[in-house]
Amino acid sequence: MNVRVKFLGASGEVTGSKYLLQIDDFTLLLDCGLFQGRKELRLLNWDKFPVDPESIDAVVITHAHLDHTGYLPKLFKDGYKGPVYCTTATADLMDLILMDSAGLQMEEARYAKKKGYSKHEDPQPLYTIEDVEPIKEHIVGTTFENPLQIAPRISVCFYNAGHILGAAIVELTLSGHEQTKKIVFSGDLGRPNDIILYPPHIMKEADILFVESTYGDRDITPTEREDVLDMMNDTFEHDGNIIVPAFSIGRTQTLLMMLKNLLHKKEIPKVRIFVDSPMAIKATEFYRKHKSYHKLEDTDIENDETFLELRNNLTVTRTAEESKKINDYKHDTVIIAGSGMMTGGRILHHLYHRLPHEENVIVITGYQAYGGRGWRLQRGEPTIRIYGQDVQVKAKVFTINGLSAHADRSELLDWLNGFEKAPKQTFVVHGEQESAESLRNALLDKGWNAHVPHYLENVELFHHI
């Protein structure tokens, strides 16, 4: 058995996770992510795929986020016809996320044509809702720690990664003629003290390891609670608004729990809260359906649309018309909308209208990819390009650290310390270059064989096993 890997994304970057494994004549794609962030990366989504999609035998997905699943409809559109292996919770969330992604792309293509800011005469989405539909028939869903045979000598097993609902560490077991080898993909690792999800499973052995490095160069120091309260109350005292670009899966639910507690304790005034993300509310239903994947009690997730204390303050907007009406509220609002990295979605409309006003605050709660809008806002750039226009940034930008769903450097190293012996080879992936190299250097100091691959690099993993 000969095994090679080709890095088709998330190599020296945090986005576009795709690893193509050639196991003898069996071709497996591990993750099928969309490139996000800066323009030169996003343009890669439109390039011809490096291999013929029809030649791929199986796809394995670690979790539902777009940077791990968002290219899947394009892969099917271009001829892929095989199975998609993932956890049952990932299957549900992935369908929701991909439908939302397709809908937004279609909406934005129409808007670009209407406003005339695209360089294309007839701008098109990368894929449509019709392109997402066929995927459902190809899903093979499973639960944690339940090995599946995906080829005569290849099995896959999913373990809890603690990142979002259903997120998995993937273990491939290859049974050669003479030896058995294990390849482990960390996926995106969560934090050990998450309030909703269980800590990441500790893996004890791997011959080859792929480990994420989003925060490979730094620990996360949580923002002081008092600083968050001061920011919120100061904003409302000055008749401002708080706009939160939020990740619909996990982050929005956490933010609403926090707001519910602040209102209950009367630590902030009774302001109006908008969740301008139908996907976030739909995602909450999956916490009910997939109870084994998290540690919430039934009482935490019942009445999810009213959120108890939020009952009189919360408005959930589903339609585009309802979303536009939020513009009528000029002060004392909290607006939570996707997408978290500000690459698209309804958050762009709110930023367009609210950024030019100095009484407003944009609150960033998660990792922002290099070169993207969130990254530019954090750097204090004076204008941000939205809908083909340079929008003035007069609003303040406030970052809440500590809400990220990614393990930080110390937590990554703690997880890596769980291996009883060093893997033969460790690939440090899913991190910006500086972050990935920092984690690689820490592993080299431990005596591990560690490498940061580059885009389209091709590496032999095993020869004649």
Image (tube, grey):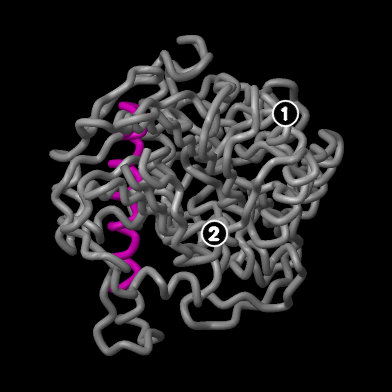
SS state under label 2: loop
Q: Residues within 10 Å of mark 2 (few under 14, many from 20)?
A: many
Where is residue 142, by image quadrant? top left
Where is mark 2, residue-wise? Answer: 11
- 450 or 99, which lies in front? 450
135 versus 153 height, above or below: below
| Label 1 secondary element | helix
Q: Looking at the image, which is closer to me, 51 or 302?
A: 51
* Residue at 30%, 46% in the rendered image: 23
Q: Position of residue 422 (x, y in %)?
A: 64, 33
Highlighted range, magenta:
86-110
> Residue tagged by mark 1?
414
Instruction: Tell me the CA gap for discs 1 and 2.
Output: 22 Å
Quadrant into which the N terminus falls: top left
Which of the 4 image quadrants contains residue 126? bottom left
The kind of residue tagged 1 is Asp
| Disc 1 + disc 2, Cβ < 8 Å | no
Magenta-colored stretch includes residue 109: yes
Residue 203 inside the magenta-drawn segment = no
Front residue (pair 397, 17): 17
Q: Amino acid at mark 2?
A: Ser
Q: Quadrant of residue 203?
A: top right
Nearest the viewer among 175 and 75 is 175
**How far from the left and from the top, in percent, is residue 403?**
67, 37
Left or right, 240 with respect to 80, comes to right
